[in-house]
Amino acid sequence: MPNIKIYSTPHCPYCLIAKNYFQKLGLQYDEINVEGDQEAQNKVFEISNQHEVPIFEINGEIIVGFKKAKIDELLGAK
């Protein structure tokens, strides 16, 4: 099972799309809500040099934005 973290906010449409996609695939993930959490926001910037969400960490690899093809590649999905 892949190790997946999603840095997100409750109002981000791409975050919701991503979470629904992982649920459809039957994958568990850790969600880190960065809204109002300065420490989480700092972590997002540290790992991605971005202040935007979603940011994905899949088995240690960072993906900025919902890039389905790259996510599928890291998950080994078809």
Image (tube, rainbow, N blue to C red):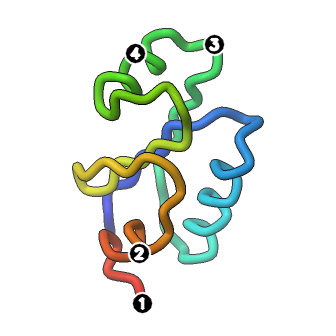
Q: Which residue is mark 3?
A: 36
Residue 77 visible in rendering: yes
Contact between labelled residues 1 and 2, with CB atoms less than 8 Å apart: yes
Q: Are marks 3 and 4 in contact (CB under 8 Å)?
A: no
Amino acid at circle 1:
Lys
Of 4 and 53, nearer the camera is 53
Q: Are marks 2 and 3 in contact (CB under 8 Å)?
A: no
Kindly identify which numbered label has been placed on residue 25: none
Write down the quadrant of residue 23 in the picture. Answer: bottom right
Mark 3 / mark 4, whichever is N-terminal:
3
Q: Spatial distance from mark 3 to mark 1, Cα to Cα?
A: 36 Å
Q: Earlier in the sequence, mark 1 or mark 4?
A: 4
* C-alpha distance separating marks 1 and 4: 34 Å
Q: Is residue 24 above or below residue 18?
A: below
Please give left or right for residue 63 compared with residue 27 in the image: left
Q: Residue at x 53, y 57 (%)?
A: 66
Q: CA distance from mark 2 to mark 1?
A: 7 Å
Circle 4: element type: helix
Dot 2: within a 10 Å radius of its alpha carbon, few (fewer than 14), some, or many (20 or more) residues? few
Residue that numbered label 1 is attached to:
78
